[in-house]
């Protein structure tokens, strides 16, 4: 797979008891990218969990990305790392993980998106588009800004923030290649049908 395969549903984990089962269901129903976001996981559990997720993604031929932590990405042989604005540079991560690694950067404005592209990111996250309870201190970004970024940035764009089956199409119509979701899948009553519906909406429009 190449960075052009960053499309459709981009699943981000959270520490729910049945997380691995939810990831498996998502992978079996079309998810091509999984990001391990283990903010509340004890340090000792992070590498074993990353390894399990990496294996699971390997079974389904999906990308496995680690949030925030290039060292952990290296240790578990992830496909890449996702960096927030304060998580160090693309160049440093690239030196650590190698040319083939996929490096994503969170962006919240046109200037951050352009900067990420200049610095050699493989894709950008763009948001926070809608209200979310999954992250504190979010910076909001609008669908109009996303449209603008789409015109200027050629990298795959992963929309994020409060995305669910009721609004995913708006993000894709505004130019996103993928929709990143945490709670929509990690807390779904019916994980499978939610993933299928998100995937369908992405495919119908991209
Ligand atoms: N970055 C911006 S918003 C967000 C992150 C990690 C949380 C997205 O979670 P949800 O539950 O899909 O709104
Ligand atoms: Mg971060």
Image (spheres, rainbow, N blue to C red):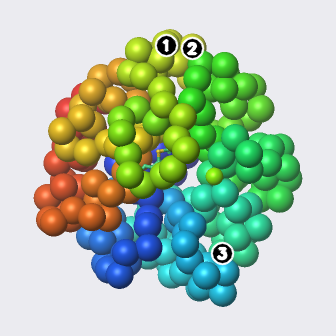
Q: Quadrant of the C terminus?
A: top left
What's the CA distance linking mark 3 and mark 2?
34 Å
Q: Nearer the viewer, residue 116 or 141?
A: 141
Examine the rendered structure and indicate whether residue 11 appears above or below residue 199: below
Residue depicted at x 49% and y 13%:
148
Image coords of residue 193 (percent x, y): 14, 58
- On whether ligand 2 comes within 8 Å of the CB at mark 3, the answer is no
Residue 34's label in the rendered image is: none
The image quarter containing residue 38 is bottom right
What's the CA distance linking mark 1 and mark 3?
36 Å
| Residue identifier under label 3 | 76
Asked if the residue under mark 2 is in contact with the one under mark 1, i.e. CB atoms within 8 Å, the reply is yes
- On whether ligand 1 comes within 8 Å of the CB at mark 1, the answer is no
What's the CA distance linking mark 1 and mark 2?
7 Å
| Residue identifier under label 2 | 152
| Residue identifier under label 1 | 148
Residue depicted at x 32% and y 64%:
186
Observer able to see residue 201: yes
């Amino acid at each position: 797979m190449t960075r052009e395969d960053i499309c459709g549903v981009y699943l981000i984990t959270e520490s729910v008891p049945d997380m691995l089962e939810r990831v498996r269901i998502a992978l079996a129903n079309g998810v091509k990218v999984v990001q391990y976001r283990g903010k509340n996981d004890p340090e000792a559990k992070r590498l074993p969990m990353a390894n399990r997720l990496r294996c699971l993604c390997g079974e389904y031929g999906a990308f496995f990305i680690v949030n925030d932590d290039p060292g952990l990405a290296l240790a578990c042989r992830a496909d890449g790392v996702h960096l927030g604005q304060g998580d160090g540079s693309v160049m440093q991560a690239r030196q650590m993980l190698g040319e083939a690694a996929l490096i994503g950067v969170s962006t919240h404005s046109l200037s951050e998106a352009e900067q990420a592209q200049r610095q050699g990111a493989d894709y950008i996250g763009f948001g926070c588009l809608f209200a979310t309870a999954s992250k504190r201190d979010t910076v909001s970004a609008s669908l109009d800004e996303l449209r603008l970024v789409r015109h200027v940035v050629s990298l795959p764009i992963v929309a994020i923030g409060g995305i669910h089956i009721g609004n995913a199409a708006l993000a894709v119509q505004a130019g996103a290649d993928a929709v990143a979701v945490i709670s929509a899948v990690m807390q779904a009553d019916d994980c499978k049908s939610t993933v299928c519906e998100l995937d369908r909406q992405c495919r119908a429009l991209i």
